Amino acid sequence: MDANLEQAYKEAKKLYEAHGVDVEEALGKLEQIKVSVHCWQGDDVRGFLFRNQELTGGISVTGHFPGAARSPQELRADLERALSLIPGKHKVNLHAIYADTDEQVDLDELEPRHFQRWVDWAKEQGLGLDFNPTCFSHDHSKDGFTLSHPDPAIRQFWIDHCKASRKIGASFGEQLGQTCVTNIWVPDGFKDSPADRMGPRRRLKEALDEVFAEPLNPAHNLDTVESKLFGLGAEAYTVGSHEFYMGYGIQNNKLICLDSGHFHPTEVISNKLSSLALFSSGILLHVSRPVRWDSDHVVVMDDELLEIGRELVRGELLDVTHIGLDFFDASINRIAAWVIGTRNTIKALLRAMLEPVEAIKKAELEGDYTTRLALTEEFKSYPFGAVWDYYCAKQGVPVREAWLAEVKTYEQDVLMKREQG
Ligand code: RNT
Ligand code: ZN
């Protein structure tokens, strides 16, 4: 390891230790954390099953950066490149439309075998896998409803798809020896004010009951449900609102997924974690960055990311929280997007671990809010970067921005040679 880097680490360590922060222990804990890296940043949420379908469901990807993955092979190669630049061992999060199969198969007929190549790859790479039914970008979702669709036949199609998805998730968990988190998000909603808000919610509840009817081994698969405030074309009413899924999840022992972009613009998920943790059986995060709306920008080191990290660390919620990412930006190099967003998420956790939590909590209990604020602010300029650099070097990944040159080389050698269509 570079001697200057090691020296800087030692100096930083001394400063933190003076406040009772055990840096070695923090790095040990950080190493255990798995971030679920979403495959869909690699190809703008297109998937491979229905290449000609437009992206629907009220989500949108903008930008025309060249080099999006066109096949499972390319996507896996891109993920390998990205993961080689991120410290730690992580998971990859798949959507159903990313099936790797030569068969013409519809969503309700998917089986574990259609994902076997992903499982073999994950095994070889030492990765875990997570899963999601894809309840959008399909003919049966084009009028904006899936699990709450008024037509029983269409509703059944989506129920069958979600059931199939849970089985696929369980097969991932069983084969990889790591629990798979299967997350259900549906876009169902109305552009304009509904005449009936209750009907679709009742149908969604009943559909979910059917989807979850078969118990699965929780060591293999955990179910989560993801709420949302609004989507493009569903501005007036979203069936699966926060209250809906909070109620459903707590009543039915399902994990609750919080996406940073799915609330009012000044409402933050960091402030929800400690409440949900007291009542739910677990939490999944979709760490994202909403800019004015649910825009899914690449995650940066902003106040909310830091606050999410703090809540997870200070509230000791890392054991009950699954950390997933959910952003998609096609205006920059997609591999860089993964690297930036994932490194930032891990970095925010490290920053939180390096704060003098005991001292700050003690000050608060004693009503010494001056010390609380003073320490919090001074620690913002403590040399956490030196600890992060040391961690990256120790994990065998590029230090600081050195990863960028590797991404640029890959861009020239691989991405620029792909023809898009
Ligand atoms: C949409 C939800 C959902 C999707 C992915 C692709 O608003 O956040 O999680 O982004 O499943
Ligand atoms: Zn999400």
Image (spheres, helix red, strand yellow):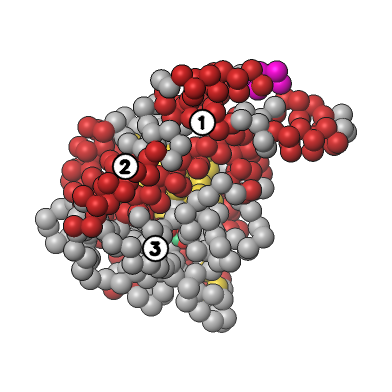
Q: Is residue 341 magenta?
A: no
The relative height of residue 1 versus residue 122 in the rendered view (above or below) is above
* Amino acid beneath label 2: Glu
- In the rendered structure, which amino acid carries the disc numbered 3? Ser
What secondary structure is marked by label 1?
Answer: helix
Q: Which is more toward the observer, 316 or 376?
A: 376
| Horizontal and vertical percent position of residue 384 | 59, 31
**Residue 198, quarter of picture:** bottom right
Disc 2 versus disc 1: distance between alpha carbons?
Answer: 19 Å
Q: Looking at mark 3, is its residue's CB closer than 8 Å to ligand 1?
A: no
Instruction: Look at 24% across and 52% down and name the residue there.
Output: 412
21 sits left or right of 7 in the view: right
Q: CA distance from mark 2 to mark 3?
A: 19 Å
Q: Earlier in the sequence, mark 2 or mark 1?
A: 1
The spot of residue 149 in percent (x, y) is: 40, 71
Give percent across and percent down for residue 255: 50, 45
Q: Which residues are magenta?
A: 16-21
Where does label 1 land, which residue?
388
Q: In the rendered image, which quarter is residue 13 located in? A: top right
Give the main secondary structure of the magenta stretch. Answer: loop
Q: Residue at x 39, y 63 (%)?
A: 331
